[in-house]
Amino acid sequence: MNSYHDGDVYPVDVGNPNSPSPPPTGAMAKILYHLSNPALYLSDNLYHSQYDPNSLQYMLEFFRNVAQTIPASNAINPSTNHKALQQFMEGEWDEEITVRTSATSVPQTFTINCSNKMTMGGRYIEGTHQGVGAGLRIEAKSVVAFDNAGSRFQVTTWNNISTAMVFLQGGWLDSAKTINLTGETTNPVDGKMIKVRHLITIVSKDEYLIEHFETLADLPEAKRVQYRCRRTKST
């Protein structure tokens, strides 16, 4: 019972409970302190570090070492869907926005700038939207993603004319050649949640369309906003 295999983290003598080993001191006491933490998972591989186990640098190196042992998988690597997002959405765009506040209102149309960049090794399209429309200075951010593990597209948006974020997710509609996304957001009028749906249609390599639908209370779904993005022509 006093022997142990190579690679064990620390040998514990359980051969004679009446004669326990003397309590360790110094560096060994620090190691035992960390080993006693029930939230810390230890493999059967001995991990060496040049840092003090009580330091933040030690913990950072520890988790970095663990992360490097995780094998690459389809869940974490960019896929053909990410390449398609990059091909059809990355770049500089003239974003024509048409807003209709109600079914009887006159739509307002204005154009702002949109800059989409693929980030984090080809995983996310991050968009920055800026301009003036309807007498307001508009700033907005967006992230478009494809979740490999869940096999679904995801979109998050937020802007300076609201304090709420919108999160939507959904799949590809092959019959309509569009991405259909659903989610919820807060109605700024009464603070209640409303259903939201986005349709993203790739018109061509130089144009895509986003249609924003809302369902208020018991009313039928209505199209409120349209975003038509055309690739900015170089001058």
Image: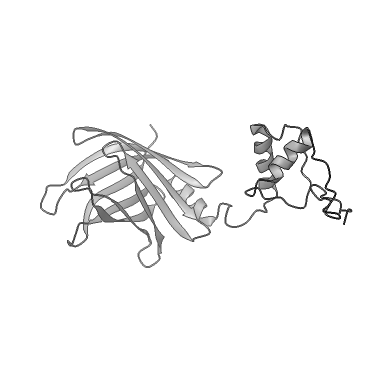
- Residue 65 visible in the displayed image: no
Looking at the picture, does residue 23 appear above or below residue 73?
A: above
Q: Picture quarter containing residue 139?
A: top left
Please say whether residue 169 is visible from this viewpoint: yes
Q: Nearer the viewer, residue 65 or 231?
A: 65
Residue at the (27%, 43%) spot, across then down: 96
In the visual, does 124 lie left or right of 65? left
Q: How many marks?
A: 0
Q: Is residue 42 above or below residue 234?
A: below
Q: Quadrant of the C terminus?
A: top left
Where is the N terminus found, in terms of image quarters?
bottom right
Q: Residue furthest left?
A: 104
Q: Position of residue 222 (x, y in %)?
A: 20, 57
Quarter residue 215 falls in: bottom left
Extreme-right residue of the structure: 3
Residue closest to the far front: 18
* Colour scheme of the picture: one colour
Give how far across and how far down residue 156 sits, in percent.
38, 47
x and y, in percent, of residue 134 in the image? 19, 36
Residue drawn at the location 22% of the way across and 55% of the way down: 223
Q: Is residue 232 left or right of residue 34?
A: left
Instruction: Please state the horizontal and vertical placement of residue 200, each as a whole percent of the image.
Output: 35, 54
Q: 182 and 45: which one is in front?
A: 45
Looking at the picture, tell me which residue is in the foreground, 80 or 224.
224
